[in-house]
Image (spheres, helix red, strand yellow):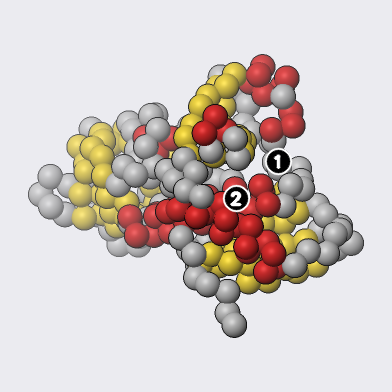
């Protein structure tokens, strides 16, 4: 199943054929622009449009038996398509774009705080990244460094490496607990800055194309979660006075 969002995160609509209906009602397509919940980023919502204009509202998108299988879960009471039926896919773009901006902000935070990541969750208004660190750090200072990266308007691009190349360069994986999926041949790197001058790390999520698109963000809170774990809360907008 081609995952269209891997090459173009700005693709909000696409056409696809129905290839299967699961026992739980999940709809399988021959290709999709819907991102499935993974890596701390929620799956897309939106709707599938039938030829007669009827809409099938999608409440969640998840992975199936493999990471390459995307399952579109309809909201309760929705009509069901037929196998082989052609649909037009529409993601909730406003929601997706917020998640793209937030996910990119999480990458920038990992640049400002170069510590192993122990957990992350991307949200529409509030995201968190947990770091394996014991140092005390000032949230205003972190916010200022984040906004320097945002305002620098650094380009964001993608490149692919083999699993063997990843094995030879294990330091590019910042997550302490989650490793990039194996068995798919190649692994995508998200590169920030010209020639990855700011950052480069494996990630299958969706991101904006320039850091300025992230917009105004700030660290709302830094929480102590154990002796050597700190949770950073990223929020949109300027820091409150």
Q: Is residue 185 left or right of residue 177?
A: left
What residue is rendered at 83% in x and 55% in y? 133
Q: Is residue 57 left or right of residue 173?
A: left
Residue sitting farthest toward the left: 52
Q: CA distance from mark 1 to mark 2?
A: 12 Å
Q: Is residue 8 above or below residue 38?
A: above
Quarter of the image where the N terminus is located: top left
Q: Earlier in the sequence, mark 1 or mark 2?
A: 2
Residue 74 position in % (x across, y down): 35, 54
Instruction: Report which residue position mark 2 lands on.
Output: 108
What is the tally of numbered marks visible in this picture?
A: 2
Residue 206: tell me if it is visible: no
Q: Is residue 218 left or right of residue 113?
A: left
Q: Is residue 36 above or below residue 120?
A: above
What residue is rendered at 42% in x and 43% in y? 209
Residue 163 position in % (x across, y down): 63, 20
- Tag shown at residue 174: 1
What residue is rendered at 57% in x and 33% in y? 196
Can you tell which quarter of the image residue 226 is in?
A: bottom right
Residue 107 position in % (x across, y down): 59, 48
Given this view, does label 1 or label 2 mark the residue nearer the observer? 2
Residue 19: tell me if it is visible: yes
What residue is rendered at 62% in x and 31% in y? 181
Residue sitting farthest toward the bottom: 241
Residue 105 position in % (x across, y down): 55, 54
Residue sitting farthest toward the right: 227
Badge 1 marks a residue whose secondary structure is loop
Q: Nearer the viewer, residue 96 or 80?
A: 96
Quarter of the image where the C terminus is located: bottom right
Badge 2 marks a residue whose secondary structure is helix
Q: Is residue 226 above or below residue 239?
A: above
Can you tell which quarter of the image residue 174 is in?
A: top right
């Amino acid at each position: 199943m081609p995952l269209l969002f891997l090459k173009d995160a700005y693709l909000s609509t696409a056409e696809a054929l129905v290839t299967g209906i699961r026992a739980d009602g999940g709809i399988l397509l021959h290709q999709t622009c819907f991102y499935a919940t993974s890596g701390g980023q929620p799956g897309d919502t939106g709707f599938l449009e039938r030829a007669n204009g009827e809409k099938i509202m999608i409440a969640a998108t998840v992975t199936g038996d493999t990471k390459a299988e995307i399952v579109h879960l309809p909201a309760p009471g929705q009509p069901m398509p037929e196998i082989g039926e052609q649909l037009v896919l529409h993601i909730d773009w406003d929601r997706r774009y917020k998640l793209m901006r937030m996910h990119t902000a999480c990458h920038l935070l990992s640049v400002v705080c170069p510590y192993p990541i122990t957990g992350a969750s991307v949200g529409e208004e509030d995201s968190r990244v947990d770091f394996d660190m014991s140092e005390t750090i000032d949230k205003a200072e972190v916010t200022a460094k984040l906004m320097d990266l945002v305002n620098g308007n650094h380009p964001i691009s993608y490149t692919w490496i083999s699993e063997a190349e990843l094995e030879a360069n294990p330091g590019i994986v910042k997550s302490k607990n989650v490793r990039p999926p194996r068995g798919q041949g190649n692994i995508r790197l998200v590169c920030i800055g010209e020639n990855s001058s700011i950052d480069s790390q494996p990630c299958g999520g969706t991101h904006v194309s320039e850091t300025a698109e992230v917009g105004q963000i700030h660290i709302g809170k830094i929480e102590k979660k154990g002796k050597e774990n700190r949770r950073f809360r990223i929020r949109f907008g300027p820091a409150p006075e």
